[in-house]
Image (spheres, grey):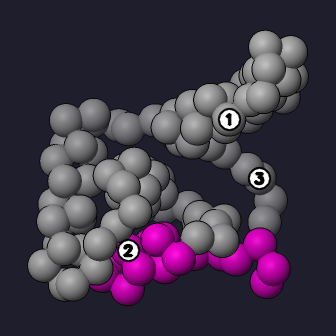
Amino acid sequence: MDSVALSPVVYQEILQGAGSGEHFEELRAYFSTLPLLVARDAVRTHEATAERYARCHWAGVTPRNSFDCLVAMTVIEHAVGLLADDRGFAAIARVDPRLPLYNHAA
């Protein structure tokens, strides 16, 4: 893996997990230096996210939350891999094989 980037919602999740104001600033200072993968067309990306969430349900898979589907669609849109150790993303990838997953232990 040559580089790392974040989607805005992952950046938000990292920051909101801070244990204090000081920790928030430490996280912000570090992670704000990484590139962000933003939607090229926000409306279409959110439509595709809603469809992916629905397709998961139709296939008998319940995504952990809609943000996971948004992260998945951002990864697909930018044609990058997703480093994740989360069964929710594995379930989404079973429904949409365009989602390339990399496990941190691999």
Residue ID at (18%, 74%): 57
Disc 3 marks a residue whose amino acid type is Ser
CA gap, disc 3 and disc 1: 23 Å
Q: Residues within 10 Å of mark 2 (few under 14, many from 20)?
A: many
CA gap, disc 2 and disc 1: 24 Å
Q: Which residues are magenta?
A: 87-106
Q: Residues within 10 Å of mark 3 (few under 14, many from 20)?
A: few
Is 69 placed above or below 97 here? above
Chain-order first, disc 2 or disc 3: 3
Disc 1 marks a residue whose amino acid type is Gly
Is 93 placed above or below 12 here? below
Disc 2 marks a residue whose amino acid type is Ile
Secondary structure at badge 3 equals loop
Identify residue for label 1.
17
Q: Position of residue 72 (x, y in %)?
A: 42, 60
Q: Which of pointers 2 and 3 indicates the residue nearer the eye? A: 2
Identify residue for label 3.
3
Secondary structure at badge 1 equals loop
Chain-order first, disc 2 or disc 1: 1
